[in-house]
Image (cartoon, rainbow, N blue to C red):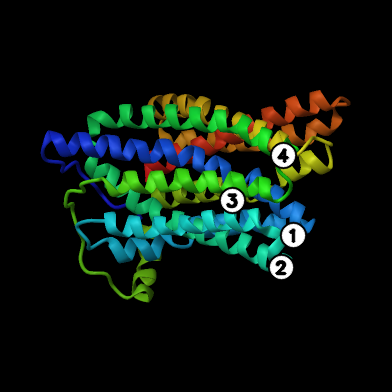
Amino acid sequence: MAVPVRCTVKGDANQRRNFWALMWDGILFTPALALFDPATTMPLLVDRLTGSSMLVGLVGTLRFAGMWLPALPIANYVKHRERKLPWLLYACLARIPVGLLGAALLFADKIPAALLLALVFITHSLFWLGEGCAGLTWTDIVGKCIPQGQRGRFFGLMQAFGSLGAFCLGFFVTWVLESDALSFPANYGVLFILSFVLFMGSFAAIALVKEPPGKVYKEAEPFAQFLRRVPEYLKREPVFLQIVAKIFLIGLSGLALPFYVVYAKEILGLSTGAAGYFISAQTLGSVVGGLIWGYLGHHRGYRRMLGYVGIAQAVAPAAALSAALVPSIGGRLAVMLMAYVFLGIGASGWSVGTNCIL
């Protein structure tokens, strides 16, 4: 359940500081996540290490669980606290294992294969659990630190520069994965270490925020009691239930994300380096989608907008499947790039819906 927030920033100095600190957080986080991507680099790594479709699918399952499971416990735990920043910083510490995994991949020849695989999934699980915990507190902090009249500029600049970084890094990913100078899995180690550096830059930016106190609720209650009240709340708020159900189902479609890049490699015959182009295409789709969803949400309402997001999400797998009908490798790559553009459009719709409705 969303926490009501209000702009309580006092003083131009703190307001400017928070604006730029939170913006740099987003600008650095976007390309960092592109390198540690559950739709490209992570499933390719797991597929190369194991060749198991089940374990590739587990990448998407763990991401989905990590994003959703912490929401209610965290909401109950932080609702009575005036300042959420310490808990956001604690959650962001779950990004540290990304750097450890990158180092392990550089020295993979000295690590047993089973241990290396365990590190991959432990890192992936911790990271997404951390992001699931961070999401609610980050939204609350932005609501308190960024005045209503500046949020359009804030999110616009953050998305523009963050997406530009991710788009450019897509070509870097292609170069690293296809380079003869880097063998497997050291090439993935380079990507994850760079991702870690960017994540730590994002963490440092968050730490610079001067969070003002905000509206609080009563003390946290026992979680079992908190859960028992959820059905009652949903009965009183059927519209809220419909919105959450739509967002949940759109997010559920993300379970298939890890299979796109493996399908492109194994079935369509595309090179591993195509993953970098997919990252750039997905980022481009996210930027285009942000413009589309912002317009539709403003003129037709964000609840109706979610229906269009579902359609965009359905186009992506249809495009990917149709790529197998194209005879040439270049044509297949072009169709898969279009599929990733629609994945980006759908992902941005999920993000816009979550931020603007909830």
Instruction: State left or right for residue 148 relative to residue 133.
Output: left
**Residue nearest the observer in this picture, 217 or 111:** 111
Q: Quadrant of the image for the N terminus?
A: bottom left
330 to 309, vertically: above or below: above
Give the structural element (helix, strand or loop) at label 4. loop
Whether residue 21 is visible to the viewer of this picture, yes or no, is yes
The three-letter code of the residue at mark 1 reads: Met
Of circles 3 and 1, the one toward us is 1
Tell me whether circle 1 and circle 2 mark residues in contact (CB < 8 Å). Answer: no
For marks 4 and 1, give the CA distance. 31 Å
Specify the label residue 252 is tagged with: 3
Q: Secondary structure at mark 1?
A: helix
Q: Are marks 4 and 1 in contact (CB under 8 Å)?
A: no
**Helix or strand or loop: what does disc 3 sit on?**
helix
Q: Position of residue 316 (x, y in %)?
A: 67, 35
Where is residue 133? Give x, y as percent: 41, 58
Extreme-right residue of the structure: 327
Residue located beneath label 2 in the image: 112
Instruction: Using the image, determine if residue 21 lies above or below residue 103.
Output: above
Q: Amino acid at mark 2?
A: Pro
Q: Which residue is mark 1?
A: 54
Q: Which of marks 2 and 1 precedes in the sequence?
A: 1
Q: 226 or 330: which is nearer to us? A: 330
Question: In percent of the image, x 54 and y 60: which residue is there?
Answer: 65
Query: Could you classify mark 2 by the number of other residues whose Cα lies within 10 Å: few (under 14), some (14-19), or many (20 or more)?
Result: few
Amino acid type for the residue under numbered disc 3: Leu
